[in-house]
Amino acid sequence: MKNSLESNVIRRVMVGTDRSETADRTVQWAAELANRYDAELFVIQVIVPKYPSTTEFGEFEQTNAGAANNDLVHFTQRVAGDRGHALVVIDADPASAIVRAAEQKAVDVLVVGNFGMAGRKKFLLGNIPNRISHSAHCTVIIVNTAHSTDERASDPVRAPLSRGESPSFEPRLAARAAHIAAVMAKHGLTELFGQSGDPDISIRRQQARRLRGALEELGPIFSKLGQILSTRPDLLPAEYIEELVLLQSRVPPMSESEVVEVFEQELGVPWEDVFKSLDPNPLAAGTIAQVHRAVLETGDRVVVKVQRPAARADIEQDLALLEIFAEKVGKRPALNQVINMGDVFKHLSTSLHRELDFRQEADNIERMRAVLANYDRLAVPGIHWDLSTSRLLVMEEIQGIPIKQAPAGQARIQAARQLLESYYKQIIVDGFFHADPHPGNLMWWKDCIYFLDFGMVGAVEAGLREHLLLMLMALWQEDAGFLTDVTLMMTDAINNNDLDVARFQSEIGEVMAKYRAASLAEMQIGPLLQEMSTVSLRHRVPLPASLTLATKALAQVQLATAELDPALDPYDVAGKYLMRLMAKRIGTALNPKTFMYQSQKLKVRTSRVIEALENLVGVRPGGPKLVVNFKANSLEDIVRHTGRRLALGLTAAASVLASGLTTTSTVVAEWVPIAFGIVAGLLTLGLVIDLLRGR
């Protein structure tokens, strides 16, 4: 204490805070002191800038300062009531800023915590309390915040106060909500929640542009939310998707001290014990994490993905607000016509929580390694599992070049074909795929393509994979009618009476013809499927969300393969892969064990059908009876003959198809396609004889 409290009348008290837990205890200590003397309380927070105010990141810091001011106002009012005043100052020298503010407000007592005065500390601001004590022209009290908060001393001058009963998260949440509301109002988005009726396209485009501007101003977390939503055209109209794709996450990189702090928290030892060197300049800085090159003590070159210290708290805070928002306004008709708020929140929450756990990303890498095991030109980085945690991911450094710079040659051509074929396998067979294969996530090294960044992956359920397989076969055979049927089955709209099926099929056919008439380099199945998705949305039969993400990924990967090998025909790759896949499935079905199992299933189902028919026609007692009297005796003969011929024809056609499929297979014995061919010939001959006899 610099001067004696007894010799002065205390009218104004100022306390410094950085909103940490220890600083909040200091503020509450100062609040009780001000309350004892019925004095005003000024709470000051100094934000240390990292970038010049004229730069883009500097403007971002100014925005954050506004949010911090709202937060501090609520906190100050809670601890001091009407006598409380909040000040937020941006200054590179916190000690000098606090002293100047104390002089400007003519405070009688200046209170600061003792954090940073002793022990092994972070190299950030130096000994601020000691500098303030020597520079201020008023009474300075340095509160010892190292005491336990479980016991409160009777005299506030002797010991710090415990924190208040209300959690500090509530005013912070309220302040953040107020800031979000202000930004939304500034960009004119509040009208979206109050209007009635479905806005036309021009109004939706204007609202979409405003939404993008608001998300960018609200900071990196909201930009990340918008980027995730840009992959879900099933949740948002096309006008919003087009705008959200343009979102940029303008995120300043973490300081070296913040990176080291996370390293040591996760590893439990000084970072120098594990790493020989660490590049302070990040390879990339994102909303949730940033990536650095490093060298382990073993000499292995690695890249380290490190999570931002406040990433989880910031995301949880904004998700809490979004959940409240979804509950309050999600049922309004005007908003519901534009956005399905319940589904939006569910998708965002799942996606962001998955990205916050780096162990899931590591598991994704290992799962993809197994998926790509049969492709010698495709690979993924190795994982250092002993050093990786939920907030730290240590991977092998891929010391390669962008795939478009891959040297010409056979390896490049093989890699292009394998890359495209692997996506058919990932989506149709394994139901697990890398959902963001843009060129920045594909590197060329050691004559292989390496997949990077597994934070975003997709999954396709088994039933949908079967439908997708039929879709690709219909595309391959240019059968618009069958493609339409499969699409409607996939969307559960096969019995939708409100759907104009003829018009829907016509538009699907136009999309197919457009891409089939394109040049070889423009034959892209991914964009074709994306246009089909747009047509489906227009007819209010949206494709499943997992398929929407899969088509987007397939479109991205085809752009990459076109750069590697412009002569590659994606329909040829798809057709040959489908032939091999069908041959493999037929071979599996011919396995004696599988054949026996399937025959028993067929036997049980057939007996159940027979029982149902017996109940229906009255053979079994107690069930409903169906009686049909035919007046023309010849009708029964016609039905019987037609059924026999139909059975012969279908079986013959199936035998021909099986013969063709097994002919191209390398895993089926040579006699199998011959046997199918003989059976097909005999059945066809029988059908011809039956037709001639019926004349």
Image (cartoon, rainbow, N blue to C red):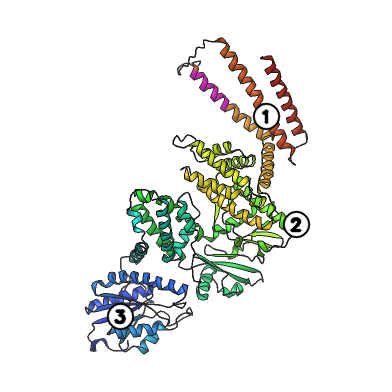
SS assignment for the magenta stretch, majority: helix
Task: Check disc 1: other Cα within 10 Å, few if <14, some if 14-19, many if 20+.
Answer: some
The mark lying in front, picked from 2 and 3, is: 2
Task: Say how many tags the image has.
Answer: 3
Considering only order in the chain, which callout, 1 or 2, is on the residue closer to the N terminus? 2
Magenta-span inclusion, residue 613? yes
Q: Which residue is mark 3?
A: 14
Q: Residue at x 66, y 32 (%)?
A: 595
Q: Which residue is mark 1?
A: 653
Q: Residue at x 42, y 51 (%)?
A: 201
Q: Residue at x 63, y 29 (%)?
A: 599
CA distance for labels 2 and 3: 73 Å
Task: Check disc 3: other Cα within 10 Å, few if <14, some if 14-19, many if 20+.
Answer: many
Question: Is 423 in front, or is 496?
Answer: 496
Whole-percent x, y for residue 472 in the image:
61, 43
Considering only order in the chain, which callout, 3 or 2, is on the residue closer to the N terminus? 3
Callout 1 amino acid: Ala
Callout 2 amino acid: Gln
**Span highlighted in magenta in the image:** 605-616
Magenta-span inclusion, residue 379? no
Q: Which residue is mark 2?
A: 410
Whole-percent x, y for residue 26 in the image:
34, 76
Label 1: element kind: helix
Q: Is there any visible trace of residue 384 in the rendered image? A: yes
